[in-house]
Structures are given as structure tokens and as C-alpha cells.
Image (spheres, helix red, strand yellow):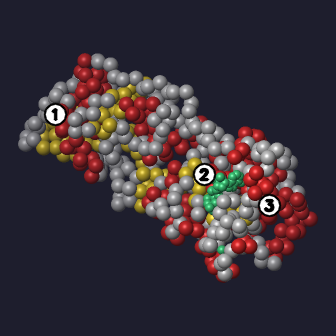
Amino acid sequence: MSYAKVLSAGLVGLAGHPVEVEADLAAGLPAVALSGLPDTALHEARDRVRAAIVNSGESWPNRRITVNLLPATLPKFGSGFDVAIALALLAGAGELPLAPLQGVAVLGELGLDGTVRPVRGVLPMVAAAAGAGVARVVVPVANAREAALVPGLRVRAADTLHRLIAYVRDGAPLLEPPEAPPGNEAAGLDLADVSGQLLGRRALEVAAAGGHHLALIGPPGAGKTMLAERLPSILPELDDETSLEVTSVHSIAGTLPPGAPLLRRPPFQAPHHTTSVAALVGGGSGLARPGSLSLAHHGVLFLDECPEFSARALDALRQPLEHGTVLIARSRGTTKYPARIQLVIAANPCPCAKPGGKQFCECAPAVRRRYLGRLSGPLLDRIDVQVNLPPLSAAELLAGGTPNEPSGPVAERVAKARAAAAARWSEGGWRTNARVPGAVLRRSPWRLPNRDTTGLRRLMDSGELSARGFDRVLRLAWTIADLDGRSRPDASDLGEATMLRTGSRP
Ligand SMILES: Nc1ncnc2c1ncn2[C@@H]1O[C@H](COP(=O)(O)OP(=O)(O)OP(=O)(O)O)[C@@H](O)[C@H]1O
Ligand SMILES: [Mg+2]
Ligand SMILES: [Zn+2]
């Protein structure tokens, strides 16, 4: 026998794909050729595989070796095919029986000493293998628990190539995935820590309930960062489908917590304003690393001190905000990752950043306008809730007697409001008010009576509200009604919605 085939898997964007690794050994000058669209990392695989085989006590077949990865049209990145290549080679050389590898997908990078190293993206790759009918997988130990998240699959782990060889040759046992420790997703930050700031709290709750983007504008120390960091604490848990999606993105990024890999809480990403565009949107050589934008998929992307971000960074957010996906340009084609995020930005109203607020500001009015104006084109226009927080007074901070409302009850109101919205828009397939097209809200049967929209129409006619702003106020009004358990917004909801939309005006 001088031919063998071993199953593995690769990735295109977030989607895993089964890959077959074939090895053919022929008489002739000793050489190794790799084919099937391999990238540079795959060429390095040749050297790693050779060293790992030799250092595992096996002899390297001194023949003309051809390794081919199928399907040839699928772009392949990274080092996750090493182990499959090594096994295909040894089996092709007649050193290993083929039967124990039938129907088993194998993933893992090899160290020169023969250790099996973890790879990124195991969850979506293993899920794809399972989807293609594979019932058994062997993965690196550090990825075993992640692979075990895929239902209906027998997962075994290997720490060394030597152990895998012993398994194939003699039926020696592989390692079991370690037991998952009891759920330990950190009990996060809580709104109970936030004193006063009723407007900020309301804005946060409305944003959470409707899935609206949120801008918190206010002087230093008002609690903008505090509030933003507590948004996930009032958002509902991810359902099974979104949880798997989010976990897959983090699997590809290599940022899954080793303990309990399945992510159930909406993620929160807060890239620093000095973050590179690549770190924000994703990039890197080999298997593209998802950026903060994709790591925040189905969760919150928080841009603190937003005006300090580079114009390029802010500009790079525009398309993904619109489409819910981000395209990463590569030397060979593009990689697409999901990026359905809730954006929260925080900003001081002006560059002088005086703690006391407006009355202590030293900036010329033109400077103030320009500062936030940097955001207006690309971002502010897309943000439904924009509030101007007042400075926190000592009385508010010290208010004894009445405790601040904690996140728990707020999260309950948010969940109810979201359920009402999802039920209402189920026909259109929108899950939150923020996603409903303006035209739908302006048409029967959802159009609100003229007598309720008088104030709003006046704002538009006087040029204070754009058409886009008009629709955003409508969306907010629906969320406010949902939070209040009413089936339709009334004039007072529209009033509050207008206030929540126009707060960032200097
Ligand atoms: N509403 C609040 N309730 C309780 N503590 C607060 C509140 N606001 C601010 N603080 C205190 O002030 C600190 C700074 O708050 P935070 O960082 O949220 O302010 P900020 O508005 O983001 O300010 P900056 O513009 O300087 O970033 C907090 O760590 C907290 O100790
Ligand atoms: Mg802050
Ligand atoms: Zn100022």
C-alpha cells in the first residue's frame, strides 16, 4: 500500500469544511510535494511533520511523497492539517493500518518534538465534520472541551503524535476530553454600583430593550464608562444558535476561556482608541484573526473616548454596522466574518474635558462643535439613543437611604420588551425594533396617528431632525412602549424618544 487518505477540516470565514488529506508514496528521488492550494504555513508543515515523525521514534519514508489536500478549490490556512498529514504519510508508507482511521477527522498542529498543539477554529471545523457525517474526531488536548460542545460526536484528544500512533497501531487509548467545571462565567458588573444618572440608566435600558446603538456624551466622571460596561448585564442570554456562532468566532480568534468554552452571555469588547484598524476589524496572516468587531458579534462593541479613535478606524466601522458582516482583505481573496453588534460610544462633549461640565468649559463654541462633529458623519447618524449626561452631583453619589436598582430587575423588563418586539415583527423576521426599516414604521398598520406625531413633524420641517432621525425616533418610541407593556406608542413616548435621540446636540 503506498496511498492513504485521512479526514480533517478547514475554514472559510466562519464556516468549517471537511478536508481530505491524501498521501501517495512512489519510488524515486526522496522529495515531498504539497498540493491543493496550500499557503506558506502549509509549506512549513512539511518540515514540522518530518521532525515530529522522526522525533516520535518513527522512520521517515525515503520516497517521493505527494501530499494533496482536497477539495483543491478550498483555500486552506494554518497549521491544523499537520497531524492528518503525518498520519496519512505513515499509513501510506505502510507503517500504520488504515482501518482505525476510517471515518475519523483529525485536527492539530505538530511541534518539532512531536507534541500535538492546539489550533484555532476547532469548534466550527468539528461542527462541519459532524455535519458531513463524521462521527469521531481526534483533536489537540487543549481543544478537546471545545470540540465536545458539538452534539452527537465522539471526541478524543491527543497530546503527542506518539500517542496517536500507538492508538492507530495498537489500539492504545487516547485521552478523554476533560470534564467541564461548573459554569463559571464571571458574575459581571452590576448596575447597583451606579448612583443617580437616571437619564443614563434610562438610555441604557431603552438601548438594551430595542437593540439600539447608544452614545453617552458627558463630562469626565459622570459614569459613562461605568454605564457602558454594565450593558451586557441587562441583555438576555444568547440562545443556542447565537451562542454557537459567537463561540465559533472566539474559537477562530483563539480567545475561548479554557474552562467553560461555550459563551452564553453577550460578549463585550472595548478596544482602546489607539487600537489598529486590523485589530478592530480583523486581519493577520494565515487564518485571519477576527477583530474586536467580530468578537463583539451578538454583543456590545464599546468605543470609549470615541473622538480619540482615528478617522480610519471609525470609517472602517461604517460598512460592518450597515451589513452585520466584515470583509477582511487578504492576499488571496477576502475573508468574511460576522459582526452583528450593538455599538456603544462614550465621549466628552469637548476636548477640554472639565469635570464640572459645560459651565467650566474653556472651549470656543466652534471647537466644541467640531469635536463631536468628527463623529457625526460616520457614526452619530446611525446611533438611535444619544444622551447628554449631566455631571454627577455629590448628593447623587452619596445618596444614602435608597439603594440603586440592580441589573436583575432591569434585565427582566428588557427581556419582556424584547419578547413583545420579536413577536410583533416576527413576520418581517426582525428581532429588535432597531432593525425594523423606517418605511415599515411609517406605513399602515404601524403608522402612528398624525395627532401624536405633530411635534416630530414640526422638528423635521424646521430642519432640526433629519428623515433618518425621524425614523430613529419612531423606533425608540416603540421600544419605550414595549418597556411599558403597551401595544402602541403614544405622544408621550414620542416625546421621550425625541429627547433620547437629540441629546448629543452641543
Ligand atoms: N453614577 C455613578 N455612580 C457611582 N460612581 C460613579 C458614578 N459616576 C462615576 N463614578 C465614579 O467615578 C469613576 C469614574 O467613572 P467613569 O469612568 O464611568 O466616568 P466617565 O464618565 O467615563 O469619565 P471619563 O470621561 O473621564 O472617562 C468611577 O470609577 C466611579 O468610581
Ligand atoms: Mg470613561
Ligand atoms: Zn471644553
Q: Which mark is residue 248?
A: none
Q: Looking at the image, in which quadrant does ligand 1 appear?
A: bottom right
How packed is label 1: few (under 14 Cα within 10 Å), some, or many (20 or more)? Answer: some
Q: Amino acid at mark 1?
A: Val
Q: Earlier in the sequence, mark 2 or mark 3?
A: 2
Residue 418 figure quarter = top right
Report whether the residue tagged 2 is closer than 8 Å to ligand 2.
no
Q: Earlier in the sequence, mark 2 or mark 1?
A: 1
Report whether the residue tagged 1 is closer than 8 Å to ligand 2.
no
Q: Which mark is residue 300?
A: 2
Q: Which mark is residue 497?
A: 3
Please give the residue where the numbered disc 1 appears in the rendered image: 54
> Residue at coordinates 67% horizontally, 53% vertically from top-left?
227
Q: Secondary structure at mark 3?
A: helix
Q: Are marks 2 and 1 in contact (CB under 8 Å)?
A: no
> Residue at coordinates 66% horizontally, 77% vertically from top-left?
362
Q: Amino acid at mark 2?
A: Val
The answer to whether residue 414 is above or below residue 273 is above
Q: How many marks?
A: 3
Q: Secondary structure at mark 2?
A: strand
Q: Secondary structure at mark 1?
A: helix
Q: CA distance from mark 2 to mark 3?
A: 22 Å
The answer to whether residue 354 is above or below residue 492 is below
Q: In which quadrant will I find the C terminus?
A: bottom right
The answer to whether residue 208 is above or below residue 142 is below
Q: Earlier in the sequence, mark 3 or mark 1?
A: 1
Percent coordinates x, y for residue 153 in the rendering: 45, 27
Q: In which quadrant will I find the N terminus?
A: top left
Percent coordinates x, y for residue 409 in the rendering: 76, 40
> Residue at coordinates 35% horizontally, 55% vertically from top-left?
285
Q: Amino acid at mark 3?
A: Ala
